[in-house]
Image: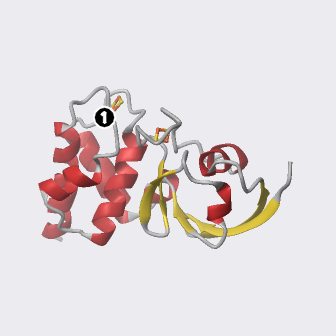
């Protein structure tokens, strides 16, 4: 298997690794970098469990080739968890009972983080739109939207 050097920033840290440029970004993150917070659900871009932030935009990492990581700025759930906004989202998810089995949660939190980073005062409608690519089989979505809205309210209070 041909490997190339990939240089990128991930969760604020510079990386230089060798990887197959045709591999999926999801596999590089989970297997090569051992960051398993990013989940694999459907493998075909439908469920959002594998969402990461790539150059400021949320993407389904199961659909992105590793070659696109070169020169990129990437944030995974592990990085989001370390940030103030991520902590606020986590707390709001717990307070609003927006987590049941939890498999979808990293993807939702990353999508919400990408939205609120750009638009800290996002409306309920904008929140719904931002998580349209994330599927949850447990919660019925309302608590998730409530949790993200609560994180917005906390930001406004500051
Ligand atoms: S695993 Fe990537 S969208 Fe479902
Ligand atoms: S909490 Fe179970 S899939 Fe969302």
- Identify whether 86 is placed above or below 98: below
Label 1 crowd (10 A; few <14 / some 14-19 / many >=20): many
Rendering coords of residue 36 (x, y %)? 58, 42
Residue 98 showing in the rendered view: yes
Rendering coords of residue 115 (x, y %)? 30, 62
* Mark 1 element type: loop
Q: Which residue is mark 1?
A: 99
Side of 54 where 87 appears, left or right: left
Q: Residue at x 71, y 52 (%)?
A: 22
Side of 71 where 135 appears, left or right: left
Residue 14 showing in the rendered view: no
Side of 28 where 94 appears, left or right: left
Q: Residue at x 18, y 71 (%)?
A: 158
Rendering coords of residue 70 (x, y %)? 67, 68
Rendering coords of residue 97 (x, y %)? 23, 35
Side of 44 where 132 appears, left or right: left
Image mark count: 1
Colouring of the image: secondary structure
Q: Residue at x 42, y 64 (%)?
A: 57
Determine if the C-beta at disc 1 is less than 8 A from ligand 2. yes
- Pick the residue in front: 14 or 24: 24
């Amino acid at each position: 298997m041909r490997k190339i050097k990939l240089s990128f920033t991930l969760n604020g840290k510079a990386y230089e690794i060798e990887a197959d440029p045709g591999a999926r970004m999801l596999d590089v993150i989970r297997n090569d970098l051992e960051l398993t917070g990013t989940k694999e659900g459907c493998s075909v871009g439908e469920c959002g469990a594998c969402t990461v932030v790539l150059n400021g935009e949320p993407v389904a990492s199961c659909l992105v080739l590793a070659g696109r990581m070169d020169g990129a700025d990437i944030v995974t759930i592990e990085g989001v968890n370390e940030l103030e906004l991520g902590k606020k989202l986590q707390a709001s998810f717990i307070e609003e009972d927006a987590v049941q089995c939890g498999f979808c949660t990293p993807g939702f939190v990353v999508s919400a983080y990408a939205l609120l980073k750009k638009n800290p005062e996002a409306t309920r409608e904008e929140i719904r739109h931002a998580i349209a690519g994330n599927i949850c089989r447990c919660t019925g979505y309302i608590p998730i939207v409530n949790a993200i809205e609560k994180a917005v309210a906390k930001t406004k209070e500051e």
